[in-house]
Amino acid sequence: MTENVLDGFKILQVKYKKESKVVRQIFVKPHNVRVLEPSKPTDRTLFVANIPPWMDKDTLQSYFQKFGNVQAVYFEFEPTVGEPSQPSSNQYFPNFRDPYETGNGFKFAYVVYERGSSVRNCIAKLDTSEQMFVACGHKPLLTGVKKYIKQYNDQIHNKNELLANIQAYMTDFDENAASQA
């Protein structure tokens, strides 16, 4: 059997579920850049490319967790050397181009391990002949109509909670304005 390697990337075979006929390829290699970024140290970070739109952060983290403790997973729409983007935290005005949301196109990821030996362990032991199945029974991924129903229902906010958040925001705003005056 030949090794699935392309330009230093190991190629991992991914399917949405076991019954799927379509196989996607995820490309994995140690992160190596000239510009140092403290949140993505080169000796403890894997660079992962071509992540399908339906794969989420938790799924990617749980897969790479078997090679060592994962400290963080950062998603991006294109490779970056700077500080990683963070998930959208504003529940009232979400970022529709959030790389952490499923369905926003193919992505890149940086998997940061707690120890550098985990990166070496992953590259050495990554079985490129096995297939990874994303939608498992223990954590099914929402797609299609079920996903859109959940997104719609998430947009409906509790009136009392919304009013409390507005009141807290305005109190903070007024305090900051008073301290600057």
Image (tube, rainbow, N blue to C red):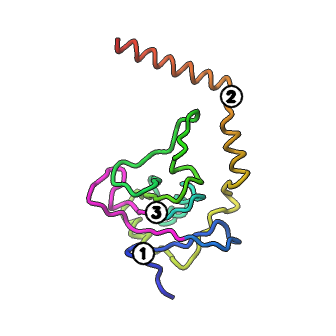
* Residue mark closest to the camera, 3 vs 2: 2
* Badge number at residue 158: 2
Q: Residue at x 43, y 15 (%)?
A: 175
Callout 3: 10 Å neighbours few (<14), some, many (20+)?
some
Residue that numbered label 3 is attached to: 68
Residue drawn at x 50%, y 68% is 26
Q: Assess whether residue 26 is covered by the magenta stretch.
A: yes
Q: What element carries label 1?
A: helix
Give the side of residue 24 with respect to residue 8, left or right: right
Residue 160: x %, y % from top left:
67, 23
Is 55 contained in the magenta span? no
Front-lying residue, 113 or 17: 17
Question: With 94 as the anchor, is 115 left or right in this view?
Answer: left
For the residue marked with disc 3, what is the amino acid? Gly
Residue drawn at x 66%, y 56% is 141
157 or 122: nearer the viewer: 157
**Image depth: mark 3 or mark 1 in front:** 1
Q: What residue type is labelled 1?
A: Ala
Q: Which mark is residue 179?
A: none
In this picture, is 119 found above or below 170?
A: below
Estimate the x, y position of residue 147 in percent, counting from the top left. Answer: 69, 50
Vertical comparison of 164 with 27: above or below: above
CA gap, disc 3 and disc 1: 13 Å
